[in-house]
C-alpha cells in the first residue's frame, strides 16, 4: 500500500500583528491623554466661568450704592429745577405768563387727544 504522506510546514509570522497591536495601544494612549487634556480644559473653563460670575456679582454689589446715589442726585436735581422754575415765575411776570400758557396748552392738547374737545376749540 502506497500511502502518501504530506507534511505541511506552516510558519506564522506574528510580527505584523504585534506591530498593529503596538500601534493600536499607542493610539489608545494618545486618545486617553487627549481626553485627559480635554477634561482639564473643561475644569479650567468651569473655574474661569465661576470666577467671572463671582466678579460680575461683586461688580453689581459695588454698583448698587452708585445707582442709589445717582437716583438721589437725579431727584435732587429735579427738585432744584422745580425750585428754580418757581423763583423765575415769582421774579418775572412774563416768564410766569409763558409758563401758564404752556400749562394751559398742554391741558388743551390732552383734552383733544382724549376726544373731549374739537380741533376748533383747541385753537
Image: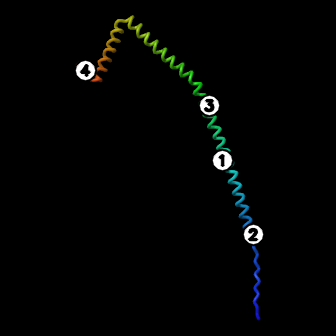
- For label 1, the SS is helix
Q: CA distance from mark 3 to mark 2?
A: 61 Å
Colouring method of the image: rainbow
Name the image quarter holding residue 113: top left
Q: Is residue 26 above or below residue 16?
A: above
Residue 88 pos. (x, y %): 40, 8
- For label 2, the SS is loop
Q: Which dot marks residue 14?
A: 2
Q: Earlier in the sequence, mark 4 or mark 1?
A: 1
Residue 90 pos. (x, y %): 39, 5
Q: CA distance from mark 4 to mark 1?
A: 74 Å
Q: Which residue is mark 4?
A: 117
Residue 8 pos. (x, y %): 75, 81
Q: Earlier in the sequence, mark 2 or mark 1?
A: 2
Q: Earlier in the sequence, mark 4 or mark 3?
A: 3
Residue 46 pos. (x, y %): 63, 40
Q: Which residue is mark 1?
A: 38
* Direction from residue 109 to residue 67 in the image, left or right: right
Q: CA distance from mark 2 to mark 4?
A: 105 Å
- For label 4, the SS is loop
Q: Which residue is mark 3?
A: 55
Rendered residue at 72%/63% (across/down):
21
Amino acid at each position: 500500500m502506497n500511502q502518501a504522506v504530506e507534511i505541511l510546514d506552516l510558519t506564522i509570522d506574528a510580527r505584523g500583528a504585534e506591530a498593529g497591536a503596538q500601534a493600536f495601544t499607542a493610539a489608545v494612549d494618545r486618545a486617553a491623554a487627549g481626553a485627559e487634556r480635554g477634561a482639564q480644559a473643561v475644569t479650567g473653563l468651569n473655574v474661569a466661568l465661576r470666577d467671572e460670575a463671582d466678579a460680575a456679582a461683586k461688580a453689581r454689589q459695588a454698583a448698587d450704592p452708585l445707582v442709589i446715589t445717582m437716583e438721589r442726585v437725579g431727584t435732587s436735581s429735579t427738585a432744584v429745577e422745580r425750585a428754580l422754575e418757581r423763583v423765575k415765575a415769582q421774579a418775572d411776570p412774563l416768564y410766569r405768563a409763558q409758563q401758564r400758557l404752556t400749562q394751559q396748552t398742554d391741558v388743551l392738547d390732552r383734552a383733544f387727544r382724549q376726544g373731549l374737545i374739537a380741533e376748533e376749540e383747541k385753537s
